[in-house]
């Protein structure tokens, strides 16, 4: 008859270690969930700070694209690491000279009409950029309202600045009143509407 060594007994599940108690298992579970929640919170804060942020639309200056009560998501990385184009919808810090009445706000949302180097003016309801009619291939309202400038004295967009307008042309307080905005004041590009659910989708 062969002998069974101690190592074989251990392999068969025999151990001198005390069994794990129920309290210890609960403690481990609580600790694991605590770590998960802390990590989730840190990721959420990081995303809001550096990547995405939601904003509420308080006015009708961007109608019909954005309506009062809409909630939008802004991509910050698209500005930090990307390029701003004509037609982009930006959220940016309200310029110090912004004084169009109503409740003061810290941030504004408008559409890019002019990028650095552009010459902009208007004739009637038509916007011209660099001498050519500006094709607004998105839904917007006419009439233009306040003119932009004249053909003989157009607005020239400075380096790292942008000329912004609301899609609701006649009812928008924008760069026609307070000038261009610096890129450093841009928070991000609006790219998705999350509310109301009936109009959920990309912008």
Image (spheres, rainbow, N blue to C red):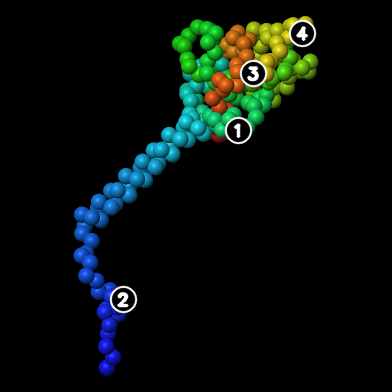
Is residue 140 visible in the rendered image? The answer is no
The residue that label 2 is drawn on is: 11
Cβ–Cβ under 8 Å for marks 3 and 1? no
Nearer to us of marks 2 and 3 is: 2
Asked if the residues shown at circle 2 and circle 1 are in contact, with their CB atoms under 8 angstroms apart, the answer is no
Which class describes the residues within 10 Å of circle 2: few (<14), some (14-19), or many (20+)?
Answer: few
Residue at numbered disc 3? 161
Question: Local crowd at mark 4 within 10 Å, few (<14), some, or many (≥20)?
Answer: some
Any mark on residue 151, and which?
4
Percent coordinates x, y for residue 58 in the rendering: 48, 18
- What is the quadrant of residue 65 in the picture? top right
- For disc 1, the neighbor class at 10 Å (few under 14, some 14 to 19, many from 20) is few
Could you say which is closer to the camera, residue 172 or residue 190?
190
Task: Indicate which disc, 3 or 4, sits on the residue closer to the N terminus.
Answer: 4
- Figure quadrant of residue 172: top right
| Residue 159 position within the rendered picture, expressed as x and y whole percent measured from the top left | 67, 18
Name the residue rendered at 25%, 53% in the picture: 26
Quadrant where the N terminus is found in the figure: bottom left
Which of discs 1 and 4 lies nearer the camera? The answer is 1
Image-based side of 149 in relation to 202, left or right = right
- Distance from Cα at disc 2 to Cα at disc 3: 73 Å
What quarter of the picture does the C terminus occupy?
Answer: top right
Q: Are marks 2 and 3 in contact (CB under 8 Å)?
A: no
Q: What separation in Å lies between label 3 and label 4 (alpha carbons)?
A: 20 Å
Q: Is residue 49 above or below residue 166?
A: below
Q: Is residue 170 left or right of residue 24?
A: right
Q: Please tell me whether mark 4 sits on a helix, a strand or a loop.
A: loop
Mark number, residue 81: 1
Q: CA distance from mark 2 to mark 1?
A: 57 Å
Question: How far apart, in angstroms, are the residues tagged by discs 2 and 4?
Answer: 91 Å
Contact? badges 1 and 4 (CB < 8 Å): no
Give coordinates of residue 108: x percent, y percent.
53, 18
């Amino acid at each position: 008859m062969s002998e069974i060594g101690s190592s074989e007994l251990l392999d068969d599940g025999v151990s001198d270690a005390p069994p794990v108690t129920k309290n210890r298992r609960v403690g481990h579970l609580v600790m694991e969930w605590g770590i998960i929640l802390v990590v989730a919170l840190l990721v959420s804060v990081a995303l809001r700070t550096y990547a995405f942020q939601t904003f509420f639309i308080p006015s009708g200056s961007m109608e019909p694209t954005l309506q009062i009560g809409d909630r939008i998501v802004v991509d910050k990385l698209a500005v930090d690491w990307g390029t701003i184009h004509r037609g982009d919808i930006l959220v940016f810090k309200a310029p110090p000279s912004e004084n169009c009445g109503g409740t003061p706000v810290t941030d504004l949302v408008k559409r890019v009409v002019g990028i650095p180097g552009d010459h902009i003016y208007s004739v009637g309801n038509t916007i011209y950029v660099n001498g050519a009619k500006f094709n607004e291939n998105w839904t917007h309202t006419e009439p233009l309202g306040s003119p932009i400038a004249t053909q003989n004295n157009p607005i020239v967009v400075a380096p790292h600045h942008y000329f912004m307008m609301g899609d609701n042309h006649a009812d928008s307080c924008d760069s026609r009143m307070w000038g261009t905005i610096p890129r450093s004041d841009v928070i991000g590009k609006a790219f998705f509407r999350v509310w109301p659910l009936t109009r959920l989708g990309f912008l």
